[in-house]
Amino acid sequence: MAESTEFVTGFSEIFKRGWMLCNSETDIFIDSTKLCTGKSSLCIRGGARKRNGCVAKLKVNTSRISPQGFSFNIQGLGRISLRSRCSDEEWQYLDLNTLKRSKSARYPLFLQNEWKRVTIEKPVVDSGYLDLEIRTGKGEPFCFWIG
């Protein structure tokens, strides 16, 4: 888990041991095909699903998140959405195309051939956990990289 990382400033230090799969229909692996920085990226891929749902999740101790939050880069394709919440509060959804937040899930087609920077703000509370989920929309295969 990410708890062994002093400050979460990017995924390079935590994705190898922090991300967990949410279903058996998704593959997650370290890959050198698409590189943002370093020698590898995290690849998450799967076929078209019958329902919207979580494909991978991460739990981060909020006291270990940098005051600036944490950022990562993403590219790929599919109906992808991020959602986050702090200590079992209400989920907040993030549209990766516009980087706008909402209180309801939307799964627009994400088609990004270049790396796109995403920043998750540090929660106001400094105790508990931040849950982050990568979710995909039904009916479309997906493949994306986090670097």
Image (tube, helix red, strand yellow):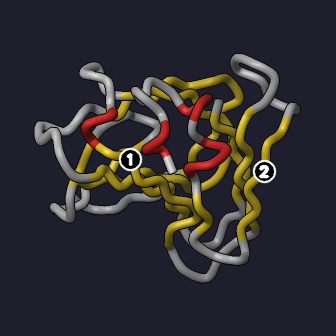
Quadrant hosting residue 138: bottom right
Residue 94 x, y percent position in the rendering: 35, 45
Q: Residue furthest bottom?
A: 50
- The residue furthest left is 124
**In the image, what residue occupies the spot 74% across and 46% down?**
43
- What residue is drawn where x is 38% and y is 58%? 106
Instruction: In this rendered view, identify the residue nearer to me: 99 or 60.
Output: 60
Answer above or below: position of 93 versus 146. below
**85 shown above or below 145:** below
The tally of labels here is: 2
**Neighbourhood count class around disc 2 (C-alpha, 10 Å): few under 14, some 14–19, many 20 upward:** some
Mark 2, residue position: 29
Residue 18: horizontal and vertical position, in percent?
56, 49
- Residue at x 73%, y 51% (from the top left corner): 143
SS category of the residue bearing label 2 = strand
Image quadrant containing the C terminus: top right
Image vertical order of residue 110 relative to residue 33, above or below: below
Q: Residue furthest right?
A: 33
Q: Residue at x 35, y 55 (%)?
A: 131
Q: Nearer the viewer, residue 114 or 146?
A: 146
The tag on residue 60 is 1
Tell me the amino acid under the disc marked 2: Phe
**In the image, residue 133 lies at what x, y percent?**
45, 57
Q: Nearer the viewer, residue 128 or 78?
A: 128
Disc 1 secondary structure class? strand
Quadrant of residue 142 within the rendered picture: bottom right
Amino acid type shown at disc 1: Val
Q: Position of residue 110 (x, y in %)?
A: 57, 44
